[in-house]
Image: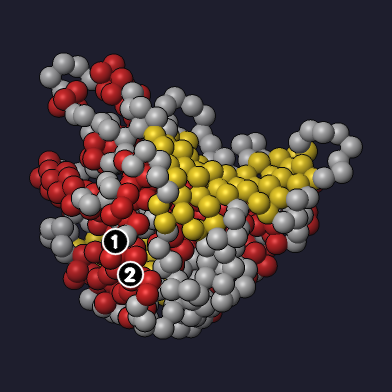
Amino acid sequence: MDNESSNISRRNFMKRSVASGAGLLVASDILSSELNAEAKKGGAATMMGVPFEPREHVRLGIIGVGGRGSSLLKDLLAVENIEIKAICDLVPEKVAHAQKAVTDAGQPQPAGFSKGEWDFKNLTQLDLDIVYIATPWNWHTPMAVSAMKNGKHAAVEVPAFTTIEECWEAVNTSEATRKHCLILENCCYGATETMVLRMVQDGVFGQLTHAEGAYLHDLRSILTANESEGLWRRFPHMKRNGNLYPTHGLGPVAHYLDINRGDRFDYMVSVSSPEASLTGYVKTHFPEGDPKRSEKYICGDMNTSIIKTLKGRTILLQHDVVNPRPYSRLNSVSGTKGAFADYPPRVFVDGQKQEEWDTIDAFREKYEHPLWKATGELAQKIGGHGGMDYVMNYRLMDCLKRGLPPDIDVYDAAAWSAPTPLSEASVAANGAPQKFPDFTRGKWDARPSSGFAQT
């Protein structure tokens, strides 16, 4: 990114981050806010279970072709009958690089948009079916809303939204325009996660009572880099204290527990540890005079939350991206007949002769997901994160072409993103409970478990 574009990105991220964080630091502001009154409004008809319009080819635009957007583009170019029609990014060189990737794949050169930070609006006015959004978090909502209001579905990188206001804006816009707003939660499509979902729905673990999800990933070098995510992703650590990145751990767990499909998140409590690691890392790795040394971080190194569902089940949710540690998303579930725990993936079923974990391999032949059986070899060659990225994109494009409802909808995107502002409010109120808005407006138990498990 050139200096001018990076300065725009920094200024705008800070400006929008301050605005989005305002008013969310007092518990009563969440519990009694007019935001929750949105759930009582009639609104337009629900988008639950609404299928895409079937089509032979999918015409697609991408906003943001940095590291993540370029990876998504690579996956999409490997899926049949996908036409990349438009590319947008602040940096002209990135647009050109993405355009070349498209033409190298044998498609016509897509239109390019790089004339300032609002040029994405011109992309959303093109004749497209869906717009992918892989930009800094603070831009997700305005870009998704622009896509939907211009008649396109929106597919948004994680977390989809950063405030409760943004969650409601996306839900209301999706319902009003009859266009889907999806969260690109790749972890729901991992080989292990999809297999465990099938085991859950087959009753292997009995009646579920508890689950755990997290994002535990040492990102210190990325957060402090002078390029890519280092130009914006560190800034929320200066303005917000809570779980800044909840969906990788929460998405798969929400599927296991049928959230918005027979149960929903009720409330959460959250606490944060002191902040120490990011400050220490900057002091150790950057010399005197570097501007980073004057930055003040307030986000605790580890944020720990407990979510209670309406059925009384509990979810442990954690976030830590600044401590030196092995990667983990926890990804566990327990019930009346057994338990699963990840990293490494292992299973315990009631009645086992030995009171120790067994590997998950014994269950693979019966419960491996059909999508992984069909595309797993190609997915691991092409897609990132062990192949889950390709499987996610393949499945979404398949739903668009066949006219199926999406696996993950705007209500999931809102519910999985809401822990960021709710955790922030709870931390500020010494762990006081924070109610989840009912983004479904009472329809959370009106549909069955996700059919994706049997696809």
Which color scheme does this rendered protein use?
A: secondary structure
Q: Verify CB contact (< 8 Å) between mark 1 and mark 2.
A: yes
Query: Left or right: where does residue 77 sit relative to residue 328?
Result: left
Mark 1: amino acid: Ser
Q: Is residue 152 above or below residue 101?
A: below
Query: Left or right: where does residue 213 sit relative to residue 237?
Result: right
Q: Nearer the viewer, residue 256 or 149?
A: 256
**Residue at mark 1 to residue at mark 2: CA–CA distance:** 7 Å
Judged from the image, the secondary structure of the residue bearing numbered disc 2 is helix
Position of the C terminus by quadrant: bottom right
Query: Left or right: where does residue 304 sit relative to residue 341?
Result: left
Which residue is depicted at the point 58% across and 49% down? 314
Which residue is depicted at the point 40% across and 45% down? 432
Mark 2: amino acid: Ala
Quadrant location of residue 65? bottom left
Quadrant location of residue 89? bottom left
Tag 2 residue: 37
Which residue is depicted at the point 52% across and 70% down? 444
Residue 225: assigned label: none
Q: Is residue 101 visible?
A: no
Is disc 2 surrounded by few (<14), some (14 to 19) or many (20+) residues within 10 Å? Answer: few
Q: Nearer the viewer, residue 397 or 74?
A: 397
Tag 1 residue: 33
From the top left corner, tell me how far across and down residue 170 is, in percent.
Answer: 33, 68
